[in-house]
Image: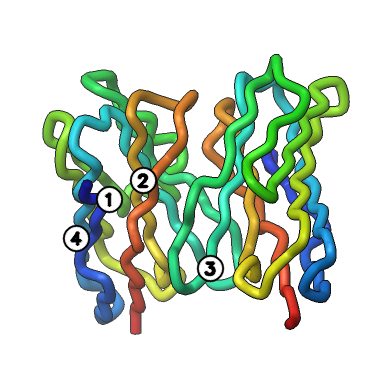
Amino acid sequence: GAGVSQSPSNKVTEKGKDVELRCDPISGHTALYWYRQRLGQGLEFLIYFQGNSAPDKSGLPSDRFSAERTGESVSTLTIQRTQQEDSAVYLCASSSRGLAYEQYFGPGTRLTVT
Amino acid sequence: SQQGEEDPQALSIQEGENATMNCSYKTSINNLQWYRQNSGRGLVHLILIRSNEREKHSGRLRVTLDTSKKSSSLLITASRAADTASYFCATDSTLTFGKGTMLLVSP
C-alpha cells in the first residue's frame, strides 16, 4: 500500500516569504506528526494530531509556524515570513493510532531559505 | 530536557562485527522504539519494545530495555555494509529523537 507522501520534495524560498508543506498520511492512520531535522541533528518534534483531539502544538518554535489537518487526512505545515534558520528537512509521520504505535515516515521536504 | 539520547555518537566497524548502541531517557515510558535513517530509505521503524519487556529480537537486531536504569541498547549482529546509517531511539512519553548514533560498516 501507499506510504506517507510529502510535497514538495525540495523547496527553495527567499527569506520573508511564506511556504506551505503538505503531508498525505497512510490511509486510516489517525495520528500524524511533523518534525524538523536540521543538518546533522536529530528530529525536533513540531506538532502532533490525534483523531479529533486538539493538536499538541508544544513543539512549534514560534508563531510563524502553524499546521492544520483535515479530519484524518492531509496536513499542511505553514511557515510564515521564513528565516534562514528555518532551513531544514521537514518530516511527516503517521501511525495507526497514537504514541503507542510505530510511526511511518515520509521522505521529507528539504526547505532552503536563501 | 532531551529524551532519547543515543551513544556513541559515531561507531565505525568492519563487516561481520557486532555493533552496540545505547539510548537513555528521562521519564517513565510505555514503549521505546528504534529507527534507522539513511539517505536511500529515509527514516524507517526497526523495532518497538514495551515497558514490560526486557528483550526483543528481530532478525539480526536485539533490543534490551532496562526501565530501572532508563536505558535501552540496540545490538546489530553480523553487520553488513548496508547497515550503515544513523540509528535513533524514541519513546512514547515525548516525541523527541536524539541526534542518533551514526554507524559506519566498512566492507
Q: Which mark is residue A93?
A: 2
Same chain assignment for discs 1 and 2: yes
Q: Are the residues under badges 4 and 3 in a single subunit? A: no
Q: Are marks 1 and 4 on the same chain?
A: yes
Rendering coords of residue B87 (x, y %): 64, 56
Which is more foreground, mark 2 or mark 4?
2
Q: Residues within 10 Å of mark 2 (few under 14, many from 20)?
A: many
From the viewer's perspective, is B40 left or right of A26? right
Query: CA gap, disc 1 to disc 4?
Result: 17 Å
Which residue does the numbered mark 4 point to in the structure image? A20
Q: Which mark is residue A4?
A: 1
Compare marks 2 and 4 and give the one earlier in the sequence.
Answer: 4
Above or below: residue A80 compared with residue B72: below
Chain for mark 2?
A
SS for callout 4: strand
Q: Secondary structure at mark 3?
A: strand
| Residue at 31% over, 54% down | A64
Residue position for label 3: B38
